[in-house]
Image: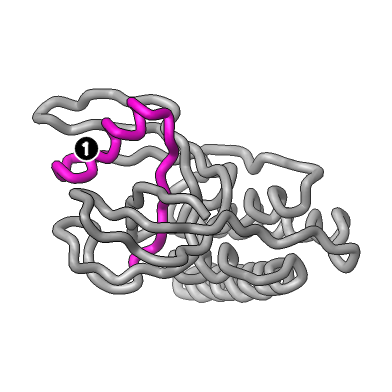
Amino acid sequence: MITLPMFPLSSVIFPESLFTLRVFEPRYLELVRECVMTGQGFGVCLIAKGHEVGGGDERYEFGTVSEILQVAEMGSGQLAISCVGRKRFRVSRWLEGSPYPKAAVEIEEVIESELITQEQVEKLRPIVLKIADSVFELSGIKQSKAIPSSVNLIEEIYHLAEHSYLGAYDRYKVLSSETLEERFNLLSELLHDLDEMYTSELKLRNQTD
């Protein structure tokens, strides 16, 4: 068990995901300073209820240890921090007595399984790409980054989930899955449902044009 500074967000970060945060609240500015001085990572977890700013939120138990890669000053005391997700954790308990949130966490990841193969996971990639094409056709918003590949199935599933246009709670369900089979089957179901939804939207729009 380790103690981590915590940064609750309204989004889910996966291991291996790159992300940027704008930091302006005094307590999180202090968190960033502490992490930079010590070289320690911080935890990101999804807010179940409440808001990122001002406290008083409720948080889900699974999250991702994240590492600060770069810090840039934005003026007016604000910082932009470039980060990468590293490892999944489960919160054991939240701690008091700190200006910013802290928690005791267990680093915990699913184990690989012979029931899930590279070939099965690779079949999800065309679905993710098709969803991205549908989103572009509907909105004009093009996904700017290619989907990374990995021979590690746990990482590969995270890569696909990261680029999948899933909502925050669905992303959380993928992150919090207890086994690799559960995670793969859930992501497959979510992707097929999302693809069906966007395909239906495209057909409806084309009919009305």
Side of 206 relative to 146 (left or right): left
Side of 124 relative to 107 (left or right): right
Side of 42 relative to 170 (left or right): left
- Residue beneath the point at 68% across and 68% down: 183
Front-most of 14 and 108?
A: 108
Side of 73 relative to 90 (left or right): left
The spot of residue 190 in percent (x, y) is: 61, 72
SS under mark 1 = helix
The spot of residue 9 in percent (x, y) is: 33, 56
Residue linked to disc 1: 30
Total of numbered circles in the picture?
A: 1
Instruction: Using the rendered image of the protein, determine whether residue 136 is visible from the camera's viewpoint.
Output: no
Front-most of 118 and 54?
A: 54
Label 1 neighbourhood size at 10 Å, few (<14), some (14-19), many (20+)?
some
- Residue beneath the point at 48% across and 50% down: 2
Front-most of 9 and 207?
A: 9
The spot of residue 71 in percent (x, y) is: 33, 26
Q: Does the stretch in magenta take in 27? A: yes
Q: Which residues are magenta?
A: 22-47
Where, by quadrant of the figure, is residue 203 drawn? bottom right
Q: Does the stretch in magenta take in 160? A: no
Q: Amino acid at mark 1?
A: Glu
> From the viewer's perspective, is residue 100 above or below residue 181?
above
The spot of residue 110 in percent (x, y) is: 70, 62
Where, by quadrant of the figure, is residue 68 drawn? top left
Where, by quadrant of the figure, is residue 52 drawn? bottom left
- Residue beneath the point at 88% across and 68% down: 115
Instruction: Using the rendered image of the protein, determine whether residue 159 is visible from the camera's viewpoint.
Output: yes
- Residue beneath the point at 40% across and 44% down: 42
Q: Quadrant of the C terminus?
A: bottom left
